[in-house]
Amino acid sequence: DTLGIPPISRGRLWRSRVSCFADQFFFFARGIMRKSETRGFVFATTGEKYTNAARKAARNLRQAMPEAQIDLFTNQKIEDAVFDRIHPIKTDFFRPKMEAMLNSRFDRSIYLDSDVIVLCDVTEIFDVLDFSDLAMAHARSREQKFMRDDSVPRAFPVLNAGVIALRRTRE
């Protein structure tokens, strides 16, 4: 790697991994895929630390899926060939993922937090969007001590906002 930012090794995992199975995704409203729909991955960062983490995560993604389209939304001035496009964030909002998902150029986007490591081809997550406009993975944090609040019904699972699949709709 000419920029000195190698992909993250499989033995050095951060907070999350993307499973090779889409069966644990939580689905929202139904949708139908059109043949001409574009698919791609989106990262969104503010600050040098998270931008560098996204660069490493994108390299890992590129190893697992060499043909993937990968975009970055950031407030940093960088050039990096691992990304197909780098978009400036218009505001320094504390949740750049919202801006990135709203402005993604893809019909079907998978947003990934900068600490998510993709270990294999996850194309099937795009296919989940044949049946929904939005999909998120269940988070296991419901069982943690701070989430044992009986006021929140168990029918409402905690969702992992680090991996979000989104299908652009006309509405």
Image (spheres, grey):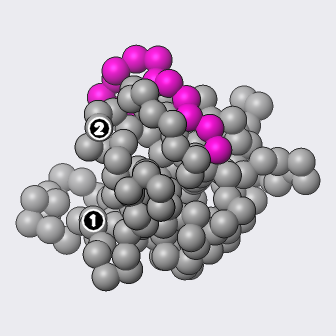
**In the rendered image, which quarter contains the C terminus?**
top right
Please tell me whether mark 2 or mark 1 is closer to you in this view. 2
Is residue 15 highlighted in magenta?
A: no
Is residue 97 highlighted in magenta?
A: yes
Q: Which residue is at 19% across, 71% downward?
A: 143
Q: Residue 108: percent from the left, percent from the top?
A: 69, 48
Badge 2 local density, few (<14 within 10 Å), some, or many (20+)?
some
**What are the residue bounds of the magenta stretch?**
84-98
Q: Which residue is at 8% across, 66% downward?
A: 145
Type of residue at label 2? Glu
- Between 41 and 131, the one nearer to me in the picture: 41
Looking at the rendering, which quadrant does residue 50 occupy? top left
Looking at the rendering, which quadrant does residue 7 occupy? bottom left
Give the residue at the far left of this rendering.
145
Give the residue at the far top of this rendering.
91
Q: Residue 10: percent from the left, percent from the top?
A: 38, 80
Q: Residue 48 carries which label?
A: 2
Q: Which residue is at 56% across, 77% downward?
A: 120
Q: Distance between the residues labelled 2 and 1?
A: 18 Å
Task: Tell me the SS state at disc 2.
Answer: helix
Q: Is residue 158 visible?
A: yes
In primary-sequence order, the first of circles 2 and 1 is: 1
- Between 70 and 31, the one nearer to me in the picture: 70
Identify residue for label 1.
15
